[in-house]
C-alpha cells in the first residue's frame, strides 16, 4: 500500500481533523453508472488553479446557469471539487446522499479556507 499524504486542519471547536487526502468511506454507498462505490481515494492537494476553474464551470453546468455563488460559499462547487480530487465525474455529486454531499462540501471548503489562512493575517 502506498503512503498517502496527510494534510490536516484542527477545527477551532476541537472536532476531528479534516484530511485533504486519503480515503473517504461513504456513509451511504451508492451505485453510479453500473459501479458500486463504498469508498474513494481523493487528494485535494494535487489540484491546480485550472482544476478549480474547471470545477466552477462544472458546478454552473449542473445548476443550469452561468451564475455562481462565491467560491467560499458554493456548496455545489465544493462537492464538485472533491469529486475532481477523487477522479470522479461532476455528475457523481448529484447521486450522493445528503450526508455524503455535506461531508464532501465541508472537506473542500476547509481545504479552500486553509489556503486563505496562509495569506490573510
Image (cartoon, rainbow, N blue to C red):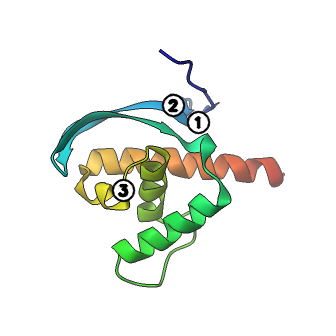
Q: Find residue 10 and report its image quarter.
A: top right
Q: CA distance from mark 2 to mark 1?
A: 5 Å
Find residue 97 and report its horizontal and vertical position in percent: 23, 49
Question: Quarter of the image holding residue 13?
Answer: top right
The image shows a total of numbered marks equal to 3
- State which tag comes first along the sequence, 1 or 3: 1
- Residue at 47%, 38% in the rendered image: 42
Q: CA distance from mark 1 to mark 3?
A: 29 Å
Q: CA distance from mark 2 to mark 3?
A: 30 Å
Q: Which mark is residue 89?
A: 3
Q: Would you say the residues marked 2 and 1 are in contact, meaning their CB atoms lie under 8 Å apart?
A: yes
Indicate the position of residue 32 as horizontal and vertical percent values.
20, 49
Secondary structure under tag 1 reads: loop
**Left or right relative to 16: residue 88:** left
Q: Mark 1 against mark 3, which lies toward the viewer? A: 3
Can you give x and y, in whole percent of width and height, for residue 88 in the image? 38, 50
Residue that carries the numbered disc 1 in the rendered image: 11
Q: Residues within 10 Å of mark 3 (few under 14, many from 20)?
A: few
| Mark nearer the N terminus (2 vs 3) | 2
Classify mark 3: helix, strand or loop. loop
Q: Which mark is residue 15?
A: 2
For label 2, the SS is: loop
x 65%, y 54%: residue: 48
Give 106 or 56, whichever is nearer the viewer: 56
CB under 8 Å between discs 1 and 3:
no
**Which label lies toward us, 2 or 3?**
3
Q: Residues within 10 Å of mark 2 (few under 14, many from 20)?
A: few
Amino acid at each position: 500500500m502506498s503512503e498517502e499524504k496527510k494534510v490536516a486542519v484542527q477545527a477551532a471547536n476541537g472536532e476531528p481533523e479534516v484530511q485533504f487526502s486519503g480515503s473517504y468511506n461513504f456513509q451511504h454507498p451508492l451505485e453510479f453508472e453500473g459501479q458500486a462505490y463504498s469508498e474513494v481515494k481523493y487528494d485535494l492537494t494535487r489540484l491546480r488553479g485550472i482544476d478549480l476553474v474547471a470545477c466552477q464551470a462544472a458546478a454552473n453546468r449542473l445548476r443550469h446557469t452561468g451564475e455562481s455563488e462565491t467560491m467560499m460559499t458554493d456548496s455545489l462547487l465544493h462537492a464538485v471539487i472533491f469529486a475532481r480530487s477523487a477522479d470522479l465525474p461532476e455528475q457523481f455529486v448529484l447521486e450522493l446522499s445528503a450526508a455524503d454531499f455535506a461531508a464532501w462540501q465541508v472537506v473542500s471548503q476547509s481545504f479552500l479556507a486553509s489556503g486563505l489562512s496562509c495569506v490573510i493575517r
